[in-house]
Image (tube, helix red, strand yellow):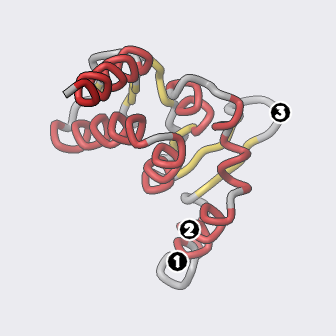
């Protein structure tokens, strides 16, 4: 398992290679409207999961798409495969998705065990807002 850090937040990976959306939610700023449960209830998300679990994926691998673990001992939260990590990040915002893709791409390209984005999410948003303001002034 690789350790993934996005915007100074550790993203847990379970034994099946699924990543914790609750950790991604925290990394994105933790807004209530972006909770994983709302994303899972979204029809587009349901359609995407249905497409992924269609005949293209063997039944033995389908558990590796999405897993919600509630209560009890051990790891809790909503865990998803990397493709759904990207979908969740895009649902939150294009800026956050860009950071997520950057971290996961670097992790694969460099085969590193710890990758971090260089700036906090709030700083990235401020810089983006300032850039838009500069362009509007022109």
Secondary structure at badge 3 equals loop
Judge by depth and name the residue closer to the eye, 81 or 136.
136
Q: Are marks 3 and 2 in contact (CB under 8 Å)?
A: no
Label 2: how many Cα within 10 Å (few below 14, some 14–19, many 20+): some
Q: Quadrant of residue 69?
A: top right
Please, which residue is most extreme toward the right here? 71
Kindly identify which residue carries mark 3.
Answer: 72
Q: Earlier in the sequence, mark 1 or mark 2?
A: 2
Q: CA distance from mark 1 to mark 2?
A: 16 Å
Q: Nearer the viewer, mark 1 or mark 2?
A: 2
**Image position of 80 with respect to 116: above or below:** below
Q: Estimate the x, y position of residue 110 in percent, counting from the top left.
A: 16, 36
User: Taking 112 as reference, is 92 above or below it?
Assistant: below
Residue 58 shows which numbered tag?
A: 1
The disc at residue 48 is 2
State which quarter of the image contains the C terminus: top left
State the SS at label 1: loop
**Looking at the image, which is closer to me, 134 or 98?**
134
C-alpha distance separating marks 3 and 1: 29 Å
How much space separates mark 3 and mark 2, taking CA atoms? 29 Å
């Amino acid at each position: 398992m690789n350790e993934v850090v996005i915007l100074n937040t550790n993203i847990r990976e379970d034994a099946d290679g699924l990543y914790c959306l609750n950790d991604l939610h925290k990394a994105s700023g933790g807004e209530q409207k972006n909770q994983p449960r709302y994303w899972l209830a979204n029809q587009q998300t349901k359609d995407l999961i249905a497409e992924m679990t269609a005949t293209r994926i063997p039944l033995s691998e389908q558990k590796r798409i999405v897993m919600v673990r509630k209560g009890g001992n051990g790891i809790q939260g909503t865990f998803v495969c990397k493709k759904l990590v990207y979908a969740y990040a895009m649902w939150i915002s294009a800026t956050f998705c860009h950071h997520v893709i950057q971290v996961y791409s670097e992790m694969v390209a460099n085969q590193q065990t710890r990758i971090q984005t260089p700036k906090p999410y709030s700083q990235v948003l401020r810089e983006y807002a300032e850039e838009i303001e500069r362009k509007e002034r022109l």
